Amino acid sequence: MDNIAGQNQGGRLAVNITVVILVLLWLLPTIGLFVSSFRDRDQISNSGWWQAPFSVDLNFRARVAADGAREEGGVFILEGNVFDDPALAANFPDGDGVVAAYGTRAVAPDEFPAGQVSELRSGGTVVVEPDGRYRVESPEDIVRGPTLYFEARTAPKFTLANYRTVLFADGMDRAFINTLTVTIPATIIPILIAAFAAYALAWMDFPGRGLLIAAVVGLLVVPLQLALVPLLKLHTDIGIGQSFFGIWLAHTGFGLPLAVYLLRNYMVGLPRDIIESAKVDGATDFQIFVRIILPLSFPALASFAIFQFLWTWNDLLVAKVFLPSGAESQVMTVKIADDLLGSRGGDWGILATAAFVSIAVPLLVFFTMQRYLVRGLLAGSVK
Amino acid sequence: MSPVLQGILTIIIGVGGCVGYFYASNMILDKVIFPARGPHAGRNINRANKVRPWLFLFPAIFALGLYLVYPVVGSFYRSLFDRSGMNFIGLGNYFDLMNEGTFRTAVFNNMLWVLFVPAMATFLGLLVAQLTDRLSWGNIAKSLIFMPMAISFVGASLIWKFVYSANPDIGIINSLRDFVGLSPVDPVQVPFWNNFFLMFILVWIQTGFAMVILSAALRGIPEETIEAAIIDGANPFQVFFSIKVPQIMGTIVVVWTTITILVLKVFDIVYTMTGGNFGTHILPSYMMTYMFRDDGRATAVAFVIMILVLPVMVWNIRQARKEMR
């Protein structure tokens, strides 16, 4: 179609630009989170993630030791360098930095620009130069050095500390294992049950088949919320209560309509002749199913498996209801939503990292298995 | 027993049990009950084949019936009782809910969600599908826009918490406001409009879904119709709106209804971003406030959700039956 009149270069450029803008818009939030998870905590709260590669102005406090004051012509002088304060050594490794502004009160750490002389409340003057040298002058003997606050440029600091905390110290590793434990059985078990049912609905003729198919389509729509209270009560009554076993059963039940729907749609498209000739050769339905249908349906099985995996991995509602609420049984989504957002609400570094740890596996599955996921979505949707 | 061990055991028992059940039941049917031998061989085979579909279907029907059909009835029944479950109060829970301001807000917000999110996601998905159709890097672009679908709603909420943060040093939106000199505002607390900020998160996620399906649909349009229109002198906009869109209208409706079903279920976003405060409650998140406290109310809210979803369910079923014929 490229050689048909109607395609012009300008139009193509506009399309390209629009798509680039849209893609950037879609990616930006995730990139922001990713960059933030590697940043130092103080730096996150002081500059946006888009300024991450640049230096950040942070506030520091230096204590000035009073010893070393000398007298010069009736005036007591105290000199030194703010960057020599041992408490600040970690932030200024070579003892050098650039002071942008300074102050003597905690509420105004950048009251005076570096190099400008200012008056001390207790009499006398102080000045802090851009390279950190300070000079305190006072008519009386200096007993206690003033506390100096200053704003200095710090180099961008990228760190893996957030990841270390989240993965090892915060209990996220437990939550990760829990999520895996919930997801894998919940993905595998529905497949077999659904495959048999789908084959019956696709290739066997019996009264009520149409009704059952319609019922499956209808059940796809039923909201999960409806099932929570009665099923939890049922589980508790029969002794399972809130447990991993209960959540596996729940996910199996909730995932079956989609599984049967997807698999049936696919199986209906399998070539009729193979099945017919197998029947002519005397194979029973069971043998046809195991030897022919199942291997041929592999793409559909893979599609559903990925769908179900992503769905159970990312699920919050079913996990909250059907699993015990103690810390040792939490899955990652519950841990983030209930635990981290509450206790570490202000620590953006930890939040960003936790979010990334929880979406890392789904993203991996997504990018490697995208083909199957797309195929599953398309099954039965394109008219 | 550790959960991991439990899991492995369950998988083995589950899969083994399934296979065992199917194999055994088929064998019993074919060898014991209706053996294909003897004077009645033909009749036996026929009878076996009549029974067999139900063998295949039984586990699925049992699971579906228990986990999805029984709750519809069970929930409604429970909602007719009070918190303790002992006293029958008829429609009392429903009347109480209707008098509750938060409930009415939740229903109103839900309507907003149902109207805005599917429309926006379908529209954006269609737009991207069309634009990326002939780009050389179209597949990469589509991949990137589809990516949010893999993320959990909780993860997506965290990502957007970063964007919406009231601190201009953290949130992009407030940083831009700061840049042009406006004071920072917390998007999540602005009355009425905060709902739209939350809705956009779901749009961000679902656009990829709409895009994938509509892209396949666009590819399925016969080229001749488009060529004929171009030869007749139609510009790209006319081609799009008069030729392409009408031909994929069926798919557009399917995408729209599928996203609508999802919108009515999702509570994670509201729960994580605001907990339902600032007037952002929707029915699923509102139900969670009663979840472990007052089962009667919780099931009543759940049933209201079911009623809202009913038209979509009926439509889907009718479409499916039409296809059968």
Image (spheres, coloured by chain):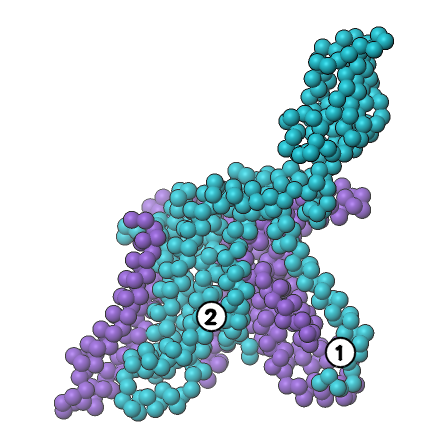
Chain colours: A cyan, B purple
In terms of image quadrants, where is residue A72? top right
Q: Answer few, some or many: residues within 10 Å of disc 2's Cα (few below 14, many 20 plus, some between 14 and 19).
A: many
Residue at x-position 78% and y-position 46% = B179
Residue at x-position 21% and y-position 90% = B42
The relative height of residue A219 versus residue A205 in the rendered view (above or below) is above
**Which element is circle 1 on?**
helix
Residue at x-position 45% and y-position 63% = A308
Chain bearing tag 2 is A
- The percent position of residue B18, horizontal first and vertical second, equals 29, 68
- The percent position of residue B324, horizontal first and vertical second, equals 45, 82
**Which element is circle 2 on?**
helix
Taking B280 as reference, is A274 left or right?
A: left
What's the CA distance linking mark 1 and mark 2?
35 Å
- The percent position of residue A81, horizontal first and vertical second, equals 74, 25
Residue B119 visible in this rendered orientation of the protein:
no
Chain bearing tag 1 is B
Say which mark, if any, is on residue B236: 1
1 or 2: mark nearer the eye? 2
Report the number of numbered marks: 2
Q: Nearer the viewer, residue B240 or B260?
A: B240
Q: Answer few, some or many: residues within 10 Å of disc 1's Cα (few below 14, many 20 plus, some between 14 and 19).
A: some
Q: Which residue is mark 2?
A: A303
Going by the numbered disc 1, the residue's amino acid type is Pro
